[in-house]
Image (cartoon, rainbow, N blue to C red):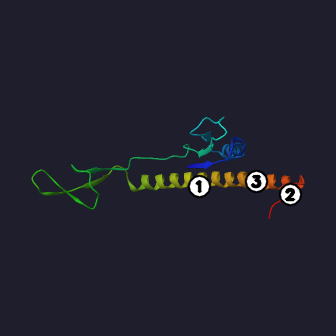
Amino acid sequence: MILHIATASLSHAAPILSAAISAGFRESGVQSLKNLTDPNAIPLVAVRSAGLAFESVIGIVRGDSVQPLYDCASNEDGRQEEEVIEALVGEEYLEMLVDVANERFEANSERIRRFEAALFGGMEKKIRRRGKSGRKQKG
């Protein structure tokens, strides 16, 4: 997952980054196109995690051209040559891959839920503190 959040300042970016890291998005960080000490900088919080990435080779395409699978390619003689997909793994292995992928989707969904809870929970606390501090609330 990759999510970029533009913030008004480093002080606004810090709680978002903290929520992301505590939720399990350990590769997250803050970046900007300008120097972060520049008052006109717009810090971006990059919420990301590559730890749940998943890939596996399950087959190959035989044929001389790289065409969509539903197309036929012409060979040098002008004859049509149909591309053939060759499976490298069996059904049982594919089922195992689907199970692993589903587990990773669920783990990532749980991280997202924790991130949302930490982010919105922190915002609610800040709003309550502002209300108790006697500041005038608009609205």
How far apart marks 2 and 3 lie (CA) works out to: 18 Å
On screen, residue 75 versus residue 105, left or right, reads left
| Dot label at residue 121 | none
| Dot label at residue 123 | 3
Dividing the image into 4 quarters, which one contains the C terminus? bottom right
Identity, as a three-letter code, of the amino acid under mark 2: Lys
Q: Residue furthest front?
A: 40
On screen, residue 81 versus residue 4, left or right, reads left
Identity, as a three-letter code, of the amino acid under mark 3: Met
Residue 78 in picture, x, y percent from top left: 11, 55
Q: Residue, x 72% and y 51% (percent of image)?
A: 118
Q: What is the secondary structure assignment of the residue under circle 2?
A: loop
Would you identify the image quadrant in which residue 127 lies?
bottom right
How far apart marks 2 and 1 lie (CA) works out to: 43 Å
On screen, residue 75 versus residue 92, left or right, reads left
Q: Residue, x 59% and y 55% (percent of image)?
A: 106
Q: Residue, x 89% and y 52% (percent of image)?
A: 133
| Dot label at residue 136 | 2
Q: What is the secondary structure assignment of the residue under circle 3?
A: helix
For disc 1, the marked residue is 106
Residue 90 in picture, x, y percent from top left: 38, 53
How far apart marks 3 and 1 lie (CA) works out to: 26 Å
- Labels 2 & 3 near each other (Cβ < 8 A): no
Closer-to-camera residue (98/129): 129
Q: Residue furthest left?
A: 77
